[in-house]
Structure formats: C-alpha cells, structure tokens
Image: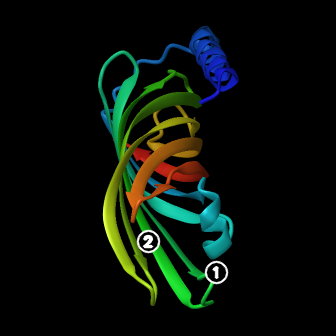
Amino acid sequence: MSPNGRKLILAGGMIFALMGPLFADVTSKKQGMFEFSYGKYKIADERFDEVYKKGGSIEGIILSSSLAFGFDFYAEIKAFYKTGTLTFTQERTTLLLIPLSLGVRYVLPGNYVLPYAGGGADFYFYYENNPIATTMNIAKGYHLLAGIYFQFGQNSPLRLSGRVKYTRVKTTEDGIAIELGGFEYGAGIAISF
C-alpha cells in the first residue's frame, strides 16, 4: 500500500473515531445479527478482466455477535460466479469463488444510523474449469471494511445496510502470482436479535 493510502486510512479512522459524540449513546440489548448481502465485486488482477470481463455480483450471508464496548465479531460467507472466454482458444471457462471472512468491527452506537469499520482474515475457496485445466485451491488474505446500518426505530430488529470492502488475497498457480482480492460494495438487509 502506498504512503498516501496509509495516510488516508489513518485520517479516515481518526474521523470515524471522533464521530462518536455526534450519535446518541444507546445501550443495546441486541446480541447479534443475521444479514443477507448483495453486492458487486471486482477482482484486482487485470488478467481476470481479459477472460471474465469486469466485475460481477456477489451474494452471501453475514452473522455477527456482540462482544464488548461496541465491538462485534462477524463471519461472512459469499459466492461469486463468472463465465468467460479463454483469450487464445476462445473456449468457455468458469470461475467460482467462495470467500469466507472472519473479523472484528467497531459499530458506533446510535438510534437510527450506526456506522461501522473493521477488518479481519479471509479464506478463499476457488474453482476454475475450462478445457485447458481445472484448478481448485484455497488462498488466504485479509480485508478492511466500512459501512452503515439504518435502523427503523430504536427497538426495531430490522436494519438496512450499505458497505464497502477491500480484500487482499494472493495465491500462486503454476508459478504465476494471482491476486483474487479486490473491491466490493453492496447492500443488505439484517435482523438483529
């Protein structure tokens, strides 16, 4: 990551931390959340654009559990599926990514608006199939995320969400380094309990 990128993340984190007094201090009795998520995902490796074209939809579920002092542990599992055309033979190829993310995030307390930021570890199961080869493996990496929940009333269990996430997941196949991570943005609907 570039020095300017680090400064931007540090400045954003400081602004996020200072926003706390702007929100009402609400004591929540909620223990966790179950969320359906839908978004767009773009693999950072430019070689994927040549074969699979840019981006695609990513869907999944997110489970979170309240820890202490506004922190949550979360686990998310999603699916990203693309079909494309091999650059030389023009034959069909398919890619399936199943990312599993585990992490901790801080949620600013509030009555109706609950912004959050966090990060954690990623485990990507990937499967690519075409006439040249079939590849199946697991890669590890990390992610940073930020988002916001919109709650419909202080006691409502229903929440809408919006989020952005950056993932860095590197692997090697046949001596070639591949970046499976990238940017994700999306929305979801959650039920707190």
Whole-percent x, y for residue 62 in the image = 39, 49
Q: Secondary structure beneath disc 2?
A: strand
**Nearer to us in this view, 112 or 174:** 174
**Residue in view at x 54 percent, y 23 percent:** 110
> At 58% from the left edge and 66% from the top edge, which residue is drawn?
57
Q: Nearer the viewer, residue 52 or 192?
A: 52
Q: Amino acid at mark 2?
A: Leu
| Residue 105 tag number | none
Among numbered discs 1 and 2, the one appearing first in the sequence: 1
Q: 17 or 111: nearer the eye? A: 17
| Residue 12 spot, x, y in % from top left | 64, 20
- The residue depicted at 59 percent of the width and 51 percent of the height is 187
Contact between labelled residues 2 and 1, with CB atoms less than 8 Å apart:
no
Cα–Cα gap, marks 1 and 2: 19 Å
Q: Secondary structure at mark 1?
A: loop
| Lateral position of residue 58 relative to residue 60, left or right | right
Residue under circle 2?
96
Residue occupying the point 48% across, 26% down: 107
Closer to the camera in the image, 11 or 172? 172
Compared with 40, 102 (above or below) is above
**In which quadrant will I find the C terminus?**
top left
Amino acid type at mark 1: Thr
Camera-near label (1 vs 2) is 1
The residue at the far front in this view is: 175
Quadrant assignment, res 22? top right
The N terminus sits in image quarter: top right
> Which of the 4 image quarters holds residue 53?
bottom right
Q: Is residue 69 left or right of residue 187?
A: left
| Residue identified by numbered label 1 | 87
**121 left or right, relative to 9:** left
Q: Residues within 10 Å of mark 1 (few under 14, many from 20)?
A: few
